[in-house]
Amino acid sequence: MQSAFPLAPALQALAEATPVEQEQRGFAHTVAEILQQPLLWAMTAGNGALSAALAGALEPKPQAVVLTGSGSSGYIGEALAPGLQAALGVPVTAIPAGTLLTHWRQTLPPGDTLLLSFARSGDSPESLGVVDALLALAPRCRHLFVTCNTQGGLATRYHAAPRAAVALLDPRSNDRSLVMTSSFTSLFLAGRMLAGPANRARWQALALQAGGEARELFAGPAQALADLADAGFDSVLYLASGGRYGGARESALKMLEMSGGRVQVMAETFLGLRHGPMSALRADTVLVAMLARDPRVRAYELDLLAELTAKGLGMRRILIGAGPDVTAGESDVRIGCGLDDDDATLIDVVAGQLLALFGCLALGQQPDAPSQGVLTRVVQPFRIHPEPMPA
């Protein structure tokens, strides 16, 4: 594969590998899908049909919005909820599809609710099971499916449902690798657009800025991430605040999946770390700090980093959004991020993808299909137990 923009030597070597080597080492899809993200963000932001579908989902304005999905797609909702609630002025909650499948009566808000289902494949058993149950039993809930797969169940199964609509992303976002990379960030950007679907210029500007920052990451700090992985690590902590915690959870999942569980991972909020989880840190734990732009939030985060330094914990650090106010050691990796906190998940997650990719290769694993025999690209069908009908 050839890149249209400069790459750090470690990434360049992967991109220039022969197709045979890419297949043998198992990274033919993952590397290309990570590198295509700036292009897909521009295409997502300029997608007129997507903007129209998002605008239509808000008419009439719902009393509440629920964001759902499974695994990575569920973390998209967590990353989006605070920013969307501030923009829309109604309660916005992220609820995993599995929780809705088993406990929708206890968790779905009362009143007129918009349920946004995010999905790469659109074929996850719990996602389809939730829609089937709610279409039958929750008449005040309407649905918008945001998916990367034109042939998936969410895209094809509900055409006749009066309370359901579909928003399709570019087919190239339907990652072929087991792990979600460009699908995650494209779906996240699509969800952000719900904050103002008619303002396409705003989202195109965001895609342009985020794409530029991602390319800077590919060209520069990516090499330091590769070097860190080559040196070896067996535990990584991801820290974030607010909605960016969803991106921290996604980054932790990428490392867990691509290392086949050989790297211990934890995602936590900066302020939550003191309440027990700090006990898991060691001096050699890799610490990924996703630093807020909001000055008050950032002050709490920097206090926590200073405390960890004083205790000698997490001394190998990746600092996303580090500025002159951050004291960094010689071995620390600085990654620039000028995006607002509601948007910064785009860069947080790309950094997490690269660290997981290089960590996977350093362990001799195959990024396209790690955890052979345990995980599948789409969760295999399982029995959906029937919903009891009301008496």
Image (cartoon, rainbow, N blue to C red):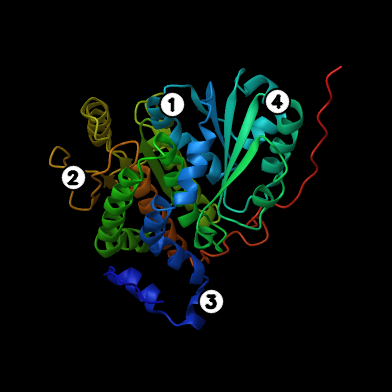
- Circle nearer the N terminus (2, 4): 4
The image quarter in which residue 244 lies: top left
Q: Which residue is mark 1?
A: 276
Circles 3 and 2, Cβ within 8 Å, touching? The answer is no
Label 4: which secondary element: loop
Check residue 328 in the rendering and tell me which mark sits there, or answer none.
2
Foreground: disc 4 or disc 3: 4
Check residue 139 in the rendering and tell me which mark sits there, or answer none.
4
Label 3: which secondary element: helix
Foreground: disc 2 or disc 4: 4
Q: What's the residue at 63%, 36% (across, down)?
A: 97
Circles 2 and 4, Cβ within 8 Å, touching? The answer is no
Q: Quadrant of the N terminus?
A: bottom left
Q: CA distance from mark 1 to mark 4?
A: 43 Å
Q: Residues within 10 Å of mark 3 (few under 14, many from 20)?
A: some
Q: Of 315 and 216, which appears nearest the observer?
A: 216
- Circle nearer the N terminus (3, 2): 3
In the rendered structure, which amino acid carries the disc numbered 4? Pro
The image quarter in which residue 308 lies: top left
Q: CA distance from mark 3 to mark 2?
A: 38 Å
* Residue 104 x %, y %: 68, 26
Foreground: disc 3 or disc 2: 3
Residue 181 visible from this viewpoint:
no
Label 2: which secondary element: loop
Check residue 23 in the rendering and tell me which mark sits there, or answer none.
3
In the rendered structure, which amino acid carries the disc numbered 1? Gly
In the rendered structure, which amino acid carries the disc numbered 2? Ala
- Circle nearer the N terminus (1, 2): 1
Please give left or right for residue 243 compared with residue 222 in the image.
right
Residue 330 visible from this viewpoint:
yes
